[in-house]
């Protein structure tokens, strides 16, 4: 197999990968209520709800079946703001749930930049003035009126059913963690007519995107009750929202050390998976809202969709709560960026939310770490990509030289190879024998140009994944018109130049004797140019520079062997 044949195979694999990457992912959706593992105050019965509710005694009366707690007193909605250096959250006493969660360091658009082309059209009177409104912080809560809010708690399969969205009491109006290092706790309380008192506690830390959720159920009745807390993340799916062809917007979970992603468009019925759920939630390409149970081995996950509402719900074990005691249900939550270092530090496998692939991550992660290290010195991810490309080329320089030398030697044998193909065109076996004899006589290895290329393919794919899903490139500027390395080149300059360099490479590479193969290779620069038009500009820059260095290396080898 000569270099042309291998390259055709390699490029075909890349085309398949790109095709898969171009599958449009559904818009942001809603997540159902999730449940977390309970920490029993009395006895723990297991993760599966019982088929029948156990009898309980409420107010001294013996009752069988599920009891519906009296509705809590009506009240007025009250918001409580939690301010930290990293985010601004708004909670409501209606259900003690989350109304808003804004990430301060991440914006919906690039601050202080203008579209050069639109600005030019406006200056010559051919276009409307560009909207220069300030970019808004990223909002992770997406719900509409009438929909349940994230972190709503329900008690499915419990012996005492509580209203989902009653008004809780709280003495706090705001928690400010911007000026200190101490943790603070927001407490909501609700009582249900001598049957139960529920305390819902959120504990916040100033230097992390994670916080604790604790639900205390105080049994005020005269007999034991069995309760099961379900914690939910709800997400509104906007049918008109644009989709990201490279990212996944939808429910995601990590169970049994494997990642599980659901396409919202394919959700048509409730689905329960588990147990062994380490975490579950809702993600986009660069951000995630995850709920983390205390006991994954006893936790399952329920996924549901109703019209434009998607829900993700953790289902944990039941608590048997004796009279006069409290059952505690503990969770953690992470709402923030899919930054590998930040996610890794959570120590629960959250870093698997970044779609590096099952085996490519072992190459993608080192590439990302090296890219961030280079950026610490040059403070420009575009330049860091260039330096990383050069470094990879230096590492594989000897293999490249060997490949180009082998191709040059193969080129010298092409006239004789054409004669053999003409002579034995009707005898494939004899043609193969004579070809190998020719290679042996001239000390040429027909695989010499292929093997060095094969070694470099995994590295390319690893870097491809790293550049495609690294949040570090989101809104990271390079120079001039490229102000976001995670977005496509707005004027398609770099992909067009990249296509030109591929065409030059194709012309410089020795042609094989197979006419069909030659025709296929002739179209590869065109195919790749169209594919790269919508690729993130950071990835295009890598491929472009790699082509330029390869052209220079091949010119050097050709001149040396002439």
Image: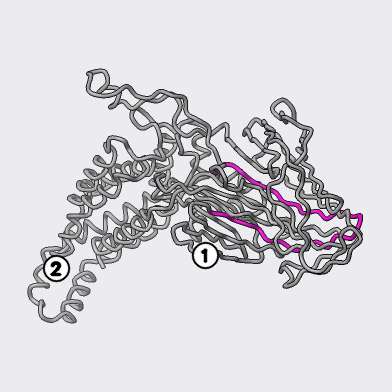
Q: Is residue 161 left or right of residue 525?
A: right
Closer to the camera, 179 or 391?
179
Across and down, in percent, residue 245 comes to 38, 50
435 falls in the magenta region:
no
Would you identify the image quadrant in which residue 102 lies? Answer: top right
Tell me if residue 82 can be seen.
no
Quadrant that contains the N terminus: bottom left
**Magenta includes 321?**
yes
Residue position for label 2:
417
Compare residues 194 and 462 and report the one nearer the observer: 194
Mark sitting on residue 269: 1
Q: Residue at x 75, y 49 (%)?
A: 71
Going 42% across and 53% down the picture, which residue do you hit?
Answer: 25
Task: Read off the magenta span.
Answer: 310-337
Of the image marks 1 and 2, the number of the one nearer the N terminus: 1
Residue at image location 13% in from the left, 64% down from the top: 515
Nearest to viewer (mark 1 / mark 2): 1
The vertical placement of 122 against 46, above or below, is above
């Amino acid at each position: 197999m000569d270099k042309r044949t291998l390259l055709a195979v390699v490029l075909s694999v890349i085309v398949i990968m790109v095709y898969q990457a171009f599958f449009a992912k559904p818009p942001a959706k809603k997540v159902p209520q999730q449940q977390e593992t309970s920490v029993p105050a009395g006895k723990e019965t297991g993760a599966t709800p019982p088929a029948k509710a156990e009898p309980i005694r409420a107010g001294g009366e013996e009752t069988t079946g599920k009891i519906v707690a009296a509705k809590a007193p009506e009240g007025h909605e009250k918001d409580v703001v939690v301010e930290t250096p990293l985010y601004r959250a708004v909670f409501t006493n209606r259900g003690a749930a989350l109304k808003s969660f804004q990430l301060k360091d991440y914006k919906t658009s690039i601050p202080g930049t203008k579209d050069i082309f639109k600005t030019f059209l406006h200056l010559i009177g051919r276009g409307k003035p560009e909207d220069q409104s300030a970019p808004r912080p990223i909002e992770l809560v997406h719900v509409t009126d009438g929909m349940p809010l994230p972190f709503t708690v329900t008690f499915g399969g419990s012996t005492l059913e509580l209203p989902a969205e009653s008004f809780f009491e709280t003495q706090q109006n705001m928690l400010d963690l911007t000026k200190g290092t101490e943790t603070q706790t927001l407490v909501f309380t609700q009582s249900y007519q001598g049957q139960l008192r529920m305390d819902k506690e959120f504990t916040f830390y100033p230097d992390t995107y994670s916080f604790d959720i604790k639900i205390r159920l105080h049994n005020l009745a005269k007999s034991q009750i069995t309760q099961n807390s379900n914690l939910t993340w709800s997400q509104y799916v906007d049918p008109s929202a644009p989709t990201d062809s490279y990212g996944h917007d939808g429910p995601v979970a990590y169970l049994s050390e494997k990642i599980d992603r659901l396409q919202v468009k394919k959700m048509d019925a409730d689905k329960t998976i588990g147990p062994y759920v380490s975490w579950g939630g809702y993600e986009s390409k660069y951000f995630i809202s995850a709920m983390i149970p205390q006991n994954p081995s006893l936790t399952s996950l329920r996924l549901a969709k109703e019209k434009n509402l998607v829900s993700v719900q953790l289902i944990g074990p039941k608590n048997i709560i004796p009279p006069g005691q409290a059952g505690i249900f503990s969770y953690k939550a992470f709402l923030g960026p899919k930054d590998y270092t930040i996610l890794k530090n959570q120590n629960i496998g959250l870093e698997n939310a970044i779609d590096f692939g099952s085996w490519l991550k072992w190459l993608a992660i080192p590439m990302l770490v090296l890219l961030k290290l280079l950026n610490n010195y040059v403070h420009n991810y575009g330049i860091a990509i260039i330096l990383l490309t050069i470094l990879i080329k230096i590492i594989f320089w000897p293999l490249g030289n060997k490949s180009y030398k082998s191709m040059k030697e193969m080129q010298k044998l092409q006239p004789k190879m054409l004669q053999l193909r003409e002579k034995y065109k009707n005898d494939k076996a004899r043609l193969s024998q004579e070809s190998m004899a020719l290679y042996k006589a001239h000390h040429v290895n027909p695989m010499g140009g292929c093997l060095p290329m094969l070694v470099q393919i995994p590295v390319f794919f690893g870097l491809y994944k790293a550049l495609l899903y690294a949040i570090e490139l989101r809104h990271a500027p390079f120079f001039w018109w490229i102000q976001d390395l995670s977005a496509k080149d707005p004027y398609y300059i770099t992909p067009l130049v990249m296509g030109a360099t591929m065409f030059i490479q194709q012309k410089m590479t020795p042609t094989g004797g197979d006419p069909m193969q030659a025709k296929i290779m002739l179209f590869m620069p065109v195919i790749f140019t169209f594919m790269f038009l919508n690729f993130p500009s950071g990835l295009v820059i890598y491929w472009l520079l790699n082509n330029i260095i390869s052209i220079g290396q091949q010119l050097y080898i050709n001149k040396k062997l002439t």
